[in-house]
Every structure is written in C-alpha cells, then in structure tokens.
Image: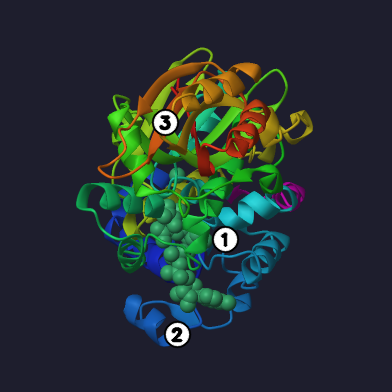
Amino acid sequence: MKSIKVGLLGIGTVGSGTFNVLKRNQQEIAARAGRGIEITMVADLNTERAKELTNNEVEVVSDANLVVNNPDIDIVIELIGGYGIAKDLVLKAIANGKHVVTANKALIATHGNEIFKAAQEKNVMVAFEAAVAGGIPIIKALREGLTANSIEWIAGIINGTTNFILSEMRDKGLDFDIVLKEAQRLGYAEADPTFDIEGVDAAHKLTIMASIAFGIPVQFDKAHVEGITKLQATDIRYAEQLGYRIKLLGITKRTDAGIELRVHPTLIPASRLIANVEGAMNAVLVRGDAVGETLYYGKGAGAEPTASAVIADLVDITRLATADPEHRVPHLAFQPDAMADTKILPMAEITTSYYLRMHVTDQAGVLADVTRILADSSISIDAMLQKEPADGETQTDIIMLTHKTQEKNVETAIAKIENLATVVGKVTKIRLEELN
Ligand SMILES: NC(=O)C1=CN([C@@H]2O[C@H](COP(=O)(O)OP(=O)(O)OC[C@H]3O[C@@H](n4cnc5c(N)ncnc54)[C@H](O)[C@@H]3O)[C@@H](O)[C@H]2O)C=CC1
Ligand SMILES: N[C@@H](CC=O)C(=O)O
Ligand code: NA
C-alpha cells in the first residue's frame, strides 16, 4: 500500500525528535500502522538547520503554506507553537482536507473548539496527544481507556520545567534563575518561559484534560492560573516539616455546583506517589467512579518523549484514515452534540484545605485571636506549627493547616487576620490536597 505522506511544520526540539524517531523505527512503525509513514516535506524559517537535521533527504521550504497547500501531503504535523501563524496553518491544512497532528497545547486550549468544528466539517482528524504531558499517553487513556467511567477528578504535575525547578531548588539548594536556564537548555521550557513558571502551560494542558474528562468545551479563560514565582523556600521547608511536598498541580474536579479548573502550588502528603515525582517528570492522577485511582507517569517534555506521542497520533490517523468518520474517536471523547455546558466554578467557590503562614509578634493572645477569627469563618484547624523566635528576635512564624473549606471563607478570615496588630505583613496561603 502507498505510504502516508507527512508534512512537518517546524523542526525545532520536538520536530527533530519526531523526524529522528520516525526514521529510526520506520519498519516497526509501518508494521503497526499497516503502511509506511514518511515525512516528505519540512517547513522551517531556518532552512539551513532544517536541511542539516534532515540530512538533505526531504524537501525543505521556509514558507509553511507550501506544505499545507501541497496536494501530495496527507497529514500535517504542526510543531511551530503559539496561537498566531500556527492557528492559521492548522485551519488551512484542515480546509485542504488534511489530517493534523499538533503538540501545541496553547493552540488547542484556546482555539480547540473552532479547530475541532472545522475538522468535523471536513471529516478530518486533529490529534494532540503530545500537547498534554508529552510522552505520557494520557489523552488516549482519558478518551478511550477510561471511557466507561464518570471521571471524578484529575490532579497532575503537567509542567516539566516547574517540577524540575522545584526539585532542583529543594534538593540542591540551587537558585531559581539558574535552574530555569538549565530547563531551557534541555529543551523543556516553552519559547516564552513565563508560560511555564506562571502556570499558563499547565493550565493549557489541564483545560484540555477537563474537556475530555467532563465533556465540556475547552475554556482556558475560565481556569485559575497561578505559578511558582511567588513560592518561598521557607514554605517548602515548613511543608516538609509537616509531612507535605509542594508541587505545581493542575486540578480539575466535578462537583455538584460545577467544575473546578485550577493550577497552583499545592501541598500534597509526602507519602503519596505523586509527591515523589521529581525533575522534569510528569504524573497525572485520574479518579474514575468505576476504576478508582489510576496514575500515569513519564517524561512530559523533551525531543524524543514528545516525539513518541506525535508519532502515536500519526499511527492512529494512518489506521483510521479510511474509516467512516462516524466511527472515529471524537476529538474531546464525547460526541459533539453531547457536550455539556457545565459551569466552571470561580475560585471563591472551590473547596479545599489550606496551609496558612503568618508572621507574628510573639506575645500572649495572638494565637487565640487567630483561632477565633478562623472559628468565626467556620474554618477548623487540622495541624499547627509554631516556631520559637530566633535568638534576639521578637517575631516568629505560625503555620496552620486547615480542614476543607470554601476559598471565600479563607479569604475573609485572612483579611481579618492581616488586620490584627500582632500580625506582621501578609498571610501566605497555599492550597492543600490530600488527594483522596
Ligand atoms: N519542547 C518540549 O518538550 C515540548 C513542546 N511542546 C510543544 O511543541 C511545539 C514545538 O515546541 P519546540 O519543538 O520545543 O519548539 P522549538 O522552538 O524548538 O521549535 C519550533 C520551530 O518552529 C520554527 N518556526 C517558527 N516559526 C515558523 C514559521 N512561521 N514557519 C516555519 N517554521 C517556523 C522554528 O524555527 C523552530 O525550528 C510547541 O507548541 C510546544 O508547546 C509540547 C510538548 C513538549
Ligand atoms: N514547557 C513544557 C513542555 C511540555 O509540554 C514543560 O515544561 O512541561
Ligand atoms: Na501525552
């Protein structure tokens, strides 16, 4: 049978990984797919480097439009990134009747609804396994493997760069900026690394998983996004003393009131497997009503781990290209006419536990004042740590872990605590999940 012809847009970190793995495992991949899969055309602004990376074996152009408009190309892989030119090229490829594979979570999380609608109208597939947790087949698991379940919640370490930064800072005492530079050198970080450190990249991935899990349109604009830049080493240490690790988690949960969709630093019990996911590794914990908890672990970034997912999508498309479109797996797992418009909850309405750290003047009655304020907001305390003031100091830290409560209660209590004359500065609040 004639091989499938693939056009590659962008041969950077993931693009070169994809080219190399596809070439190295060519025969095995063809044996699985039922026919050969061949990259025949590459577009990259840096044509010289592209020619070098492809050993002058394929046609290299600088204008990506030449690929999406080429009638010989069956599948377009978009690995340029961003929402500008990438969106334009993906929509053009679809309009030209080509299937699309992309690793671009920013694009899918912000324009996925429009892209899937266009693809459905043209009977083509848009596959995006690499967009969430890189090489971990989490899209496949959520869309197909767990299809019998009503998904209750997902909690994941889904940004390799920030997990790498947190691990290196904790274990080696290295500086934030130095570790970030290393993550960039290793090809983990986004073109704009603020997307990583401010939680945006994780929120893109979480948005996509939430849609597949709960049958809702992608709604990145409703996600709560908080990164690791304000996290202090003091809190990482106190959390450890209380038996917790701090991770940047993406959490999405179905509740009676609506869906929680949030990315923020989170305390998790140190004894949980996911708390021990270190370096650039990713892990996604999914709880389904039938299966219970399942955990997916692996490399979420890097050239070949991400290529693994890109090529898995190429094989899926190759196998399904001739199937009746009605029998393909829907883009977001649910049939388009069965999508729900369930409300995404504002942060004030989410329910979780909290780590609160306050810097106080060490005098009688402080603790009583703080606990009274918490009790007035119906917040009960689960654990507490009060440090002795250092020699010669009159101020110290009090750390409290609360039981579950609504975020708005905590915000009200924090405002009152910060007004106490004995409390110095702001109260640090980090959310805490027992993950059970
Ligand atoms: N690096 C990683 O570990 C992962 C990256 N991704 C996603 O994969 C995509 C690609 O990421 P990387 O390979 O890291 O980026 P990269 O920056 O290494 O590669 C992008 C390539 O696109 C080329 N390019 C830029 N504008 C172009 C244009 N108008 N026409 C043709 N080529 C153009 C650049 O010259 C570069 O070679 C992004 O969407 C990223 O979010 C997803 C998972 C992991
Ligand atoms: N920048 C991302 C790359 C993969 O999606 C990360 O660090 O996880
Ligand atoms: Na994946």
| In the displayed structure image, the side of residue 254 where residue 361 appears, left or right | left
Which residue type does callout 1 highlight?
A: Asp
Foreground label between 1 and 2: 2
Residue 273 magenta-drawn? no
In percent of width and height, residue 104 lies at 55, 57
Please tell me whether mark 2 sits on a helix, a strand or a loop.
helix
What residue is shown with label 1?
74
Alpha carbon of mark 3 to alpha carbon of mark 1: how far? 58 Å
Foreground label between 2 and 3: 3
* Front residue of this view, candidates 393 and 23: 393
The picture quadrant where one finds residue 188 is bottom left
Alpha carbon of mark 1 to alpha carbon of mark 2: how far? 22 Å
Label whose residue precedes the other's in the sequence (1 or 2): 2
Residue 117 magenta-drawn? yes
What residue is shown with label 2?
47
Q: Which mark is residue 399?
A: 3
Label whose residue precedes the other's in the sequence (3 or 1): 1
